[in-house]
Amino acid sequence: MKIMKCCFLLVLLSILLLGCGRYQEAPLDQQLVTQTNYGENEEKEPDFNYEKFLLRVDYEKGLSYEVLFDQHQKIAQIHELKDQTVFGTDAFNQLSPHLMEMSFNEDTQEDQVIEDVLRTLGLKESYKRFMLDVQFANGLQKSYQR
């Protein structure tokens, strides 16, 4: 009987000790915890003057520079002079800052538009042909050619 009581107490003591270990507060893993500030620092869409932007600049020896940008579909494609092509998210992210930097609107003179595009994109002015189709944020579509 003493042996049974000792075994019973030993089992009960083991359960109590094991139970206490399970309910101890474990430190929080900092990588799993994120702090959310509702209403603050909300990431908003970049504000472009253009919904769609299609550019082709032809140079000597068959070289060309092409840009396709669609703000709503979040797609873009850049075909550079040396047959390098960038498209998808990379192209969209690469073009976005340049398009936000461009200052022309639907009322800007054609010469100023062409100068602004070439300067902002870092293109040479020695082109053979310049073609730009733009759909502005207000829905108006314009073409610029030279």
Image (cartoon, rainbow, N blue to C red):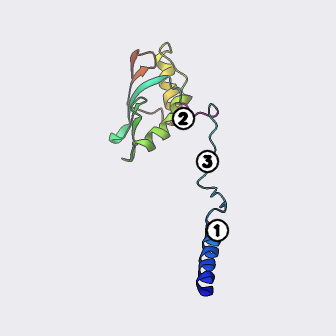
Check the picture and name the quadrant holding the C terminus: top left
Asked if 112 appears above or below 15 in the picture, the reply is above
Crowding at dot 2, Cα within 10 Å, few <14 / some 14-19 / many 20+, comes out as few
Extreme residue toward the front, this view = 1
Q: Amino acid at mark 3?
A: Thr
Which of the two residues, 116 or 24, is positioned nearer the viewer here?
A: 24
Question: Whole-Å distance between the Cαs marked 2 and 1?
Answer: 55 Å
Check the picture and name the quadrant holding the N terminus: bottom right
Which mark's residue is nearer the viewer, 1 or 3?
1
Q: Amino acid at mark 1?
A: Gly
Q: Earlier in the sequence, mark 1 or mark 3?
A: 1
The percent position of residue 84, horizontal first and vertical second, equals: 39, 47
Q: Amino acid at mark 2?
A: Pro
Q: Which residues are magenta?
A: 40-44
Label 2 residue SS: helix
Q: Earlier in the sequence, mark 2 or mark 3?
A: 3
Residue drawn at x 61%, y 67% is 19
The rendered magenta stretch, by its main secondary structure, is classed as loop
Which of the two residues, 25 or 36, is positioned nearer the viewer here?
A: 25
Which of the two residues, 6 or 145, is positioned nearer the viewer here?
A: 6
Asked if 141 appears above or below 63 in the picture, the reply is above
Which mark's residue is nearer the viewer, 2 or 1?
1
Q: Which residue is mark 2?
A: 97
Residue drawn at x 42%, y 34% is 74
Extreme residue toward the left, this view = 62
Q: Which residue is mark 1?
A: 21
Q: Which dot marks residue 69?
A: none
Which mark's residue is nearer the viewer, 2 or 3?
3
